[in-house]
Image: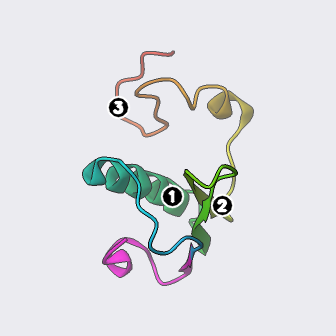
Amino acid sequence: MQSHNKVFPEDVVIDLEAGCEGARIKAVESQIEQILLNLANNAKDAMPDGGLLTVSTLKGPSGKSIIIRIGDTGTGMPADVLANIFKPFFTTKSGVYRDWE
């Protein structure tokens, strides 16, 4: 993630742990970048007083896949939000259309 200092306040520490350097994946780069940026922005929003954002990679059990882990020390999600996270276009942002309500 480039230029994270323009996106994240100084009290959000970013820890990048590359556990499989040199590994390649078959994916559309812009899609992976968008996914990671969305997750990182959500993490930032969940840490209004700062915290730690960790992004790590490791080889999957078969050795033929890569696992990308993203974690933060944010506030977490209430049960009603957690129950909807895999619904397409789900958001908790105000002023955005919500079709699950």
Amino acid type assigned to the residue bearing label 2 in the image: Gly
Q: Which mark is residue 96?
A: 3
Q: Which is more toward the observer, 80 or 57? A: 57
Amino acid type assigned to the residue bearing label 3 in the image: Val
Viewer-side label of 3, 2? 2
Q: Which is more toward the observer, 70 or 84? A: 70
Check whether the beta carbons of the residues at disc 2 and disc 1 lie within 8 A of each other: yes
Q: Which segment is the magenta one?
A: 1-17
Q: Residues within 10 Å of mark 3 (few under 14, many from 20)?
A: few
- The answer to whether residue 28 is magenta is no
Q: Quadrant of the N terminus?
A: bottom left
Q: CA distance from mark 3 to mark 2?
A: 22 Å
Amino acid type assigned to the residue bearing label 1 in the image: Asp
Position above or below: 53 against 70: below
The residue that disc 2 covers is 74
Q: Position of residue 97 (x, y in %)?
A: 35, 24
Q: Residues within 10 Å of mark 2 (few under 14, many from 20)?
A: some
The residue that disc 1 covers is 45
